[in-house]
Image (spheres, rainbow, N blue to C red):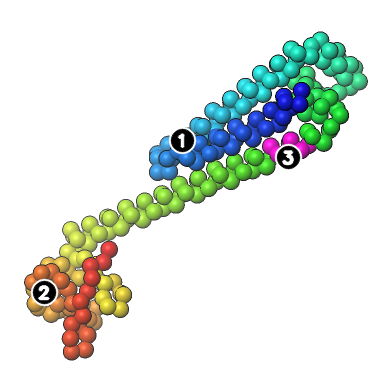
Amino acid sequence: MRTMMKTLATIGLLAIGAGTASAQGMNCVGRPDFDACVMAPVQRLQQQNAASQQQLMQNYVAQNSPRIQQEYAQARNQGTPLSFEQFVYWRIMTRNGADPGNLQRAQQDQFNGLQGANRTLQEGYATQRQYMQDNSRRSTEAVENWTNGAIRGVSPYVGPNGGQVMLPYGAPANQPFNSGGQVYVRDGQGNFFVRQGNGWAPMAAGR
């Protein structure tokens, strides 16, 4: 009896915990079927959990019949609103009514487990949203870089002050030119320099 009660009290939490851990461990982020990928192991183990609970209750009834049938009939005559399955669950969880607080504790534990599972799923969704945002940003940057290079004929360069500017990569070599109020020059190897005082400061390729 005690072993069965403990099993029923914890099986839901074990299944939920295993499901979320499995979903978390899977490489779902970035997949087009992200929702299905995350939920599939959770739903599968919840179904297994329900089946295990049903089997345990059936075993309990088989071991305690017909006494439990008689007790349920008596409870019905006294006006209990519980179904037979609910009555059996109540008997198991309260040790035949001797410990009603155990049922409340089990329900609280299950609620806490569901809350934890929900947090894990929400973290997964947050990771997916961040991935999609990052992927969108990278795609936008790739299109912009292609547009700058293929259409506008410019590339990003970073000056000594950390500022980034777009300069024409096809500028004639060793011929200073003005852009945005600054004077630049490209050497024969394609490196750019910006005028600073009486000298030239090198620039680095940007992204």
Outermost residue, bottom side: 198
Dot label at residue 117: none
Dot label at residue 37: 1
Q: Are marks 3 and 1 in contact (CB under 8 Å)?
A: no
Dot label at residue 187: 2
Identity of the amino acid at label 1?
Cys
Q: Which residue is under mark 3? A: 108
Query: Where are the magenta residues, as a range?
Result: 104-110
Q: What whole-number distance in Å separates the C-alpha atoms at marks 2 and 1?
A: 53 Å
Q: Nearer the viewer, residue 67 or 72?
A: 67
Evaluate whether residue 67 shows in this view. yes
Outermost residue, front side: 3
Position of residue 36 relative to residue 47, above or below, is below
Position of residue 194 relative to residue 1, above or below, is below
Q: Quadrant of the C terminus?
A: bottom left
Position of residue 46 relative to residue 111, above or below, is above
**Mark 3 residue element:** helix
Identity of the amino acid at label 2?
Asp
Q: What whole-number distance in Å separates the C-alpha atoms at marks 3 and 1?
A: 29 Å
Q: Residue at x 13, y 74 (%)?
A: 186
Looking at the picture, how far across and down is residue 120, in whole percent?
56, 44
Q: Quadrant of the N terminus?
A: top right
Outermost residue, right side: 78
Q: Nearer the viewer, residue 17 or 84?
A: 17
Looking at the picture, how far across and down is residue 173, in whole percent?
8, 73
Looking at the picture, how far across and down is residue 5, in whole percent?
74, 27
Dividing the picture into quadrants, the one containing residue 81 is top right
Identity of the amino acid at label 3?
Gln
Counting residues from the start of the chain, the first of labels 2 and 3 encountered is: 3
